[in-house]
Image: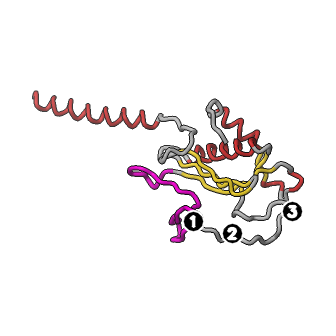
Amino acid sequence: MNRIATFYYALLSVFGLLFFSSAVYALDPMEYKPFDGYEGYQEILVKPYVYYVAYHGKEIYSAADVDDAWATRVAQLCLANGANKYINLQYLFEPVLNSDPPVVSVNQEVLSGRYVKVAGGGFIFIPMNTPRSGNVSIEAPSKLGHVLCVTDASKVLNPARIVNVGKVMEVAKSRGWLNIQNKP
C-alpha cells in the first residue's frame, strides 16, 4: 500500500508542477519592446514618411496582441514625424496620395534580408534580418508591412484606409505600453 501511495503522490506532483508551470507561462504579459532576437519591434525607414515595420511575438501571444503592438510602433514613428495618421500599404510603392505617380520604378539595389516561405508554397522577401535564437515555434505570430505616415489627409486617394494614430495610442495606453521609453 505504501508503494501505491508513493506512486500516486509522485504522479500528482508531476501533474501539479506541469499545470502550475503552464498556468504561469500563460499569464506572461506581452512585452512591448525593441526586437531582442526573439520578440519585439523593428523598423526600416524606406524613405521619408515610409517605414517597413515588423513585430514578432511569442507563440503564446494572439494575433490581435501582435497587431496592437505593431500599430503602436507605427503610431510612435508617425508621431515622431509630425503625422497623426497612417496608411497600411499593400506594397512599397503603392500610389495612395494624389501626388503619387501610377507606376514607380523599383530601386534594384540588393537589400539584406531573407526569403520566407508562405502558405501556398510561394516565397516573400523580407528586407530585414530577423535571426531567432533557440527553438522557435512556427506558430509565433508576427506582423510585417509597409506604412505611410500621413500629415495631410486631403491628399489621400482613399480616405477610408486612413488609420488614426490617436486611437492606436489609446489602445497602447490601456495596455500600459506608453510608460516605456521607446526612441523612434
Q: Quadrant of residue 17?
A: top left
- Residue type, numbered disc 2: Asn
**How far is the residue under mark 2 from the one under mark 3?**
19 Å
C-alpha gap between disc 1 and disc 3: 28 Å
The residue tagged with tag 3: helix, strand or loop? loop
Which badge, 2 or 3, is on the more N-terminal residue? 3
**Disc 3 designates what residue?**
99
The percent coordinates of residue 92 (x first, y second) are 70, 63
- Say which of marks 1 and 2 sits in front: 2
Q: Which residue is mark 2?
A: 107
Q: Helix, strand or loop at disc 2? A: loop
Q: CA distance from mark 1 to mark 2?
A: 15 Å
Residue 175, by quadrant, is top right
| Left or right of 141 in this view: 136 | left
Front-most of 15 and 73?
73
Graded by Cα atoms within 10 Å as few (under 14), some (14 to 19) or many (20 or more), the crowding at tag 3 reads: few
Sequence-earlier tag: 1 or 3: 3
Q: Quadrant of the N terminus?
A: top left
Q: What segment is highlighted magenta in the picture?
A: 112-140
Q: Give me the disc on residue 125.
A: 1
Q: Tell me which colouring the rendered structure shows.
A: secondary structure
Residue 24, position as x, y percentages in the image: 42, 33
Q: Residue at 43% of width from left, 37% of height from top?
A: 25
Under mark 1, the amino acid is: Phe
Which residue shows up at 51% across the image and 54% down it?
130
| Residue 142 pos. (x, y %) | 55, 52
Camera-nearest residue between 126 and 169: 126
Q: Nearer the viewer, mark 2 or mark 3?
A: 2
Q: Quadrant of the C terminus?
A: top right
Find out whether residue 90 is within the magenta segment: no
**Whether residue 126 is visible:** yes
Residue 118 highlighted magenta (yes or no):
yes
